[in-house]
Image: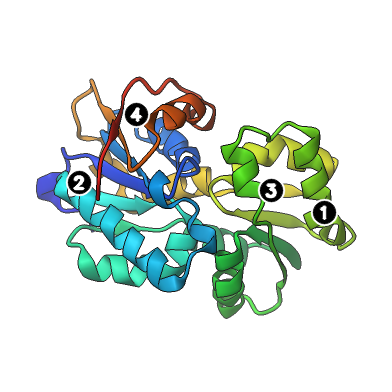
Amino acid sequence: MINTKKTNFPIGVFDSGLGGLTVLKYLLKTFPEQDFIYLGDLANLPYGNKSKDKIIHYSIKCSQFLESKNVQGIVIACNTASSYALKSVKAKTSVPIFDVVSPCVQKIANSEINNIAILGTEKTIESKIYSKSINAINSKIKIYNKACPLFVPIVEEGLENSKISMNIIDYYLNDIKKQKIEKIILGCTHYPILLESLNDYFNNNIEIIHSGPVVAERLLSLLGLNLLKSPSNRTVSYYVTDLPSRFKKFGNKFLDDNIDKVKLVSI
C-alpha cells in the first residue's frame, strides 16, 4: 500500500529508455494532479538482450535512484525488468512497486477468449511470464509467444512509420497472422509506437492491448484518490543516464507532450 504520509510525494517511473513514456502518458491523464519522476536508463538500453543478472542490477539501481528522490511508489514501466527483476526490486526498496505485466495478465485471463499472441523482447518471451501467469488463472487460453527484438531499435530510431518497419512486422508476424488470434498483448512498452502499423498489418481485425491504459486503470482501482493529493501545479521531472538530447528529441512522440528539460544523471 501507498504510505499515507507520502501521498503528496511524486510517483517514480523507470524504463531502459523511451518506451516507459507510453505508460507515463496514461498515468498523467489518469492522475492529473499527481507529480511524477521519470528515469530512462539509456546508458544500458535495451534491457531485452541483457542477462538476467544485468537486468536485475540495472533495475535495482533505477529504483534506488527514484527512492532517493523520496517517491511514494515506483512503476517499473519495462516488461523485461518486470519479468525478471520485480522480486529483487521489491526486496531492495521500501516503497510500493508496481509492474506492467500483471495488470495485462489479469485483463486477459479473466476474459472470454481462446487464442492470444504475446509480442515482446527476447528476454520477456524467454521468461514465459505472460504464458505461465495467464494459464495459471485460465488454462484454456492458447498462447502464441513471439519475440520481436528489432521493434525496439526501430522505435528508438524513429522508423516506426517506414517501409522498413512494415517489412520487419511482416517478418516477425506472418505466422501469427495465419492463426485465429483474438487479441494481441504488446509485451514491451516501446511497441505502442508501432500500434498504427500493427493495426494496418492486421486490417484492424484484432484488438491490441498495451500496458499504458491497463496499468493506469489498475493503479486507479488499487489506490483510488490517494494519488490525487499533490498540488494542482504538478511537476514532471525527467532524468536519463545517457543522451539527454536524444531523449528530448524522440520522447515527445512517446508522450504526446513536450519534454522541456531532461537531466543527465549517473546511477
Residue farthest along the right direction in this orientation: 178
Q: Is residue 51 left or right of residue 202?
A: left
Q: Of label 3 and label 1, which has the lower sequence position? A: 1
Identity of the amino acid at label 3?
Ile
Foreground mark, 3 or 2, reads: 2
Q: Of label 2 and label 1, which has the lower sequence position? A: 2
> Residue 76, relative to residue 236: is it above or below?
below
Q: Check disc 4 and report its element: helix, strand or loop.
A: loop
Residue that carries the numbered disc 3 in the rendered image = 208
Residue that carries the numbered disc 4 in the rendered image = 32
Residue drawn 51% across the image and 29% down it:
250
Q: Which mark is residue 85?
A: none
Q: Position of residue 266 (x, y in %)?
A: 25, 46
Residue that carries the numbered disc 2 in the rendered image = 71
Q: Of label 2 and label 4, which has the lower sequence position? A: 4
Q: Position of residue 127 (x, y in %)?
A: 55, 73
Residue that carries the numbered disc 1 in the rendered image = 171
Residue drawn 29% across the image and 53% down it:
62
Q: Observer-nearest residue: 144 or 16?
A: 16
